[in-house]
Image: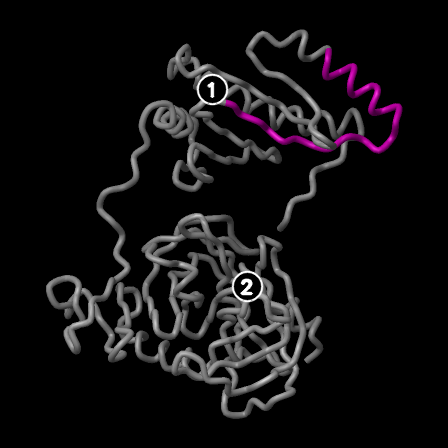
Amino acid sequence: MEFQDIIEAYQPAIIQIAANGSSGTGFFLEQYHMIVTNEHVVGKAAEVTIAGRTFNKMFSNVWYTDKKHDLAFIQPPPVGGFPSLPLGNYEQLKDGDEVIAIGHPYGLNYTATQGVISRAKRVRQGLHFIQIDAAINPGNSGGPLVNTRGEVIGVNTFIIRGGDNLGFALPVAYLKAALELYLPYKGSPATRCPNCNFLVLVSNIDSNKYCPSCGTEVKIPEIPILEYMPAGSAKLIEEVLKDLGKDIRLARNGTNKWEVKEGSAKIKISYNTETFFISGDAYLCQLPEHPQKISELYRFLLEQNYEHSNGLVLSCVGQNVVLSIVMYDLDITREAAAAMFKSLFEKADEYDNLLIRDFGCVPRLEEP
């Protein structure tokens, strides 16, 4: 297969994964109905966010972790339309074989890099790894390594920092063994003991934290009963967003930061604990390309700001037109905050369409 054909065929099955402030890559295997990634991508999280070409960002449970082989399996989204990714044969790999690594390095979605196998059977940490010279970077972890036949031959796992394209992928043979081990218990939380390779389940774990086979301390990925609950102004913001129909957990974008979409507009909300100000910035479209239209746009924005009595402000940040609100947390009530956020959301979508239609503004480019 041509590499371009492989990339196009694989993209719908390449999953973006975020957990505990970090991000990585996964890929969906239709024959097992599971998303595969690295254990270090999910970390201690029993629930992560996933997103892909065919579905929006959502929460998903971590089913299986395997620290020794750096593997994790995640529940797939309730949608179809994924391509079938065949698994290759590790024993057939040879030094010099051409490969391609697909993932989301540094948040750059669906990046593919081509290279060759430098060493098909490099031993590290007591396991075989595929050493490759295809560039892989943070964010590539958990993505597939693919051969010229379009077969998954490994899981991109780690790099040697400071090395010149020294990347390593876990061979598909280890992945197949883990899949077959876990398959009879699919949908149940489980972890593989790093010492004896025993599959530890909720039903057989000793004293809720020890492997029943060798006594090693292990951790099964279980969703905690107690959910994170913010306090103070952060709690007020989340209550208001919930009242306005937003999914709070998906909106969280860091400490005291949230991000939601309203129509075609992306809205970033933050709370500054030093100044005690709550701000909401709706990134609309970008400035028009024609100079005359830019002058007309500036005049319109100034007129709108003069007419607004609800605290909304239109401005230009670089090439972006931004609609903003600012509230002082000591003076704001839940009802007043709800009214301001509702106005921001409604006007953001309205202005976005109006500026593109009447002033020739350019829609903001977003990663798919």
Quarter of image, res 36:
bottom left
Badge 1 element: loop
Of residue 95 and residue 25, the one placed in the foreground of this image is 95
- Residue span colored magenta: 279-302
Residue bearing mark 1: 275
Residue 235 vs residue 269: left or right? left
Residue 81 % position (x, y): 53, 63
Residue bearing mark 2: 140
Q: Amino acid at mark 1?
A: Thr
Residue depicted at x 45% and y 26%: 271
Residue depicted at x 67% and y 28%: 352
Q: Amino acid at mark 2?
A: Asn
**Mark 2: few, some, or many residues within 10 Å (few <14, many ≥20)?**
many
Q: How is the image coloured?
A: one colour
The Cα atoms of the two marked residues, 2 and 1, are separated by 38 Å
Residue 295 painted magenta? yes
